[in-house]
Amino acid sequence: MTALGNDVQRLTQAAFQSLQAGDARQAKAGFERVIALTQGDTMHWLGLALACTRLGDEASALSALDRSLKLEPRNLRAVLLKADLLARQGRARSAFEHYRHALQLAGSAPGLPEDLRSGIDRARAACAEQDRKYRDFILDRLRSQGIHPADSHPRFRESLELAFGTKQIYYQQPRMFYYPSLPQQQFYEREQFDWVAQVEAATGRIRVELLRVMQEPARFSPYVKSGDSTIGRDDQGLADNSDWSALYLWEHGRLVPDNVPLFPDTLAALDLAPMPHIAKQAPMALFSKLAPGTRIPPHTGLLNIRLICHLPLIVPTDCGALRVGNETRPWVEGQMLIFDDSIEHEAWNNSDKERVVLLFEIWRPEISAEEREMLAAILVAVKDYAGQ
């Protein structure tokens, strides 16, 4: 190391020792000497900013922080210190932007030391307060114009929840095939489909058929099988696990012969639904059984050209719910739930009894008959290529 290097190292060490000892004036002089000799690095400018802050020279502290952040924009200490100084000066908007940036940086930096953890706590509190002020201001302004969000259009109400950060944006993310320009809609309402009421009317008859077969548990098999990766690459603990099990009526586009004579009313009800017919792939229809205390972790389906239907048949008290994107809905026996499974979703059964739904797929209503033919053709080609 050169003589200059030795001097810089000695001066830097002395400056930080002065800072730790509470002698901010001596620390400031030390950092200024180092910077004069070397132009300074991130550490020297940050040390100078800390010394100036303790001396009450906020203008010089901010100037030093700007130099530090120019050299290392993602330095969490510098971002937090600048946010604190801006807040102290009453520059709420700028302080909020820096606190928000600090939270983003901290999210990718686990194992923070104590001083940074306390800084992150300040950042969270400051951002929460700023979010509250923003929300109250916007809502007060809307109410003054006669607009009451609780009574407004659901889409407008959701836009406010997204703007206020109480909900996040979820998009279709199918794992195999994406068809563009379809609505990013999490749940569809039962009233949108003229066939739903007829299927729901068959709930009692379907349940009778199901209860007979549930006396033979071996007819059900794990929904996720080894290597299937239906939920995730490691199957998230559900591979070959009967906690989430299925009894298929239609599987890979074929009726399951052994089950056809057992479920005449169920199959008749399914005939009313616009299920896709794609060679070796669709329809899919099954009884989905969720054991007590089981949770299906967040995941997305293969395609966004279909919707998934749940007809709840056995729903224990305090069972749980299905979350799709931002929205969570409980199962109610005999009332269909219809959702886009290409959007992240999860389900859980918190009760001490089994939950069973009739699960099947339908074409999305936005896709025309012509498109359905073309989509079936491409999916058959994809399947045939994979089978070569």
Image (cartoon, rainbow, N blue to C red):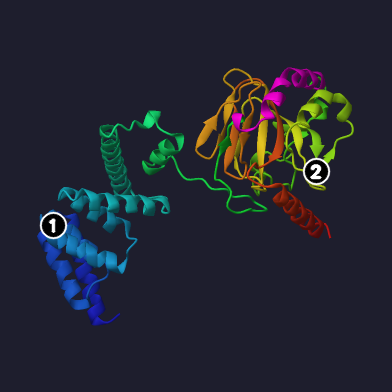
Q: Which residues are magenta?
A: 191-213
Q: Is residue 130 above or below residue 95?
A: above
Tell me the residue that label 2 is attached to: 252
* Number of residues whose C-alpha sits closer than 10 Å to that of mark 1, classed few (under 14), some (14–19) or many (20 or more): some
Question: Residue at position x 17%, y 67% from top?
Answer: 31
Q: Quadrant of residue 212?
A: top right
Q: Is residue 68 above or below residue 179?
A: below
Q: Position of residue 251 (x, y in %)?
A: 80, 39
Q: Quadrant of residue 60?
A: bottom left
**Cα–Cα span, label 2 and label 1:** 69 Å
Q: Position of residue 22 (x, y in %)?
A: 14, 54
Tell me the residue that label 1 is attached to: 58
Q: Position of residue 262 (x, y in %)?
A: 86, 24
User: What kind of residue is marked 1?
Assistant: Glu
Q: Nearer the viewer, residue 224 or 303?
A: 303
Question: Residue at position x 57%, y 36% from top?
Answer: 187
Q: Is residue 357 above or below residue 64?
A: above
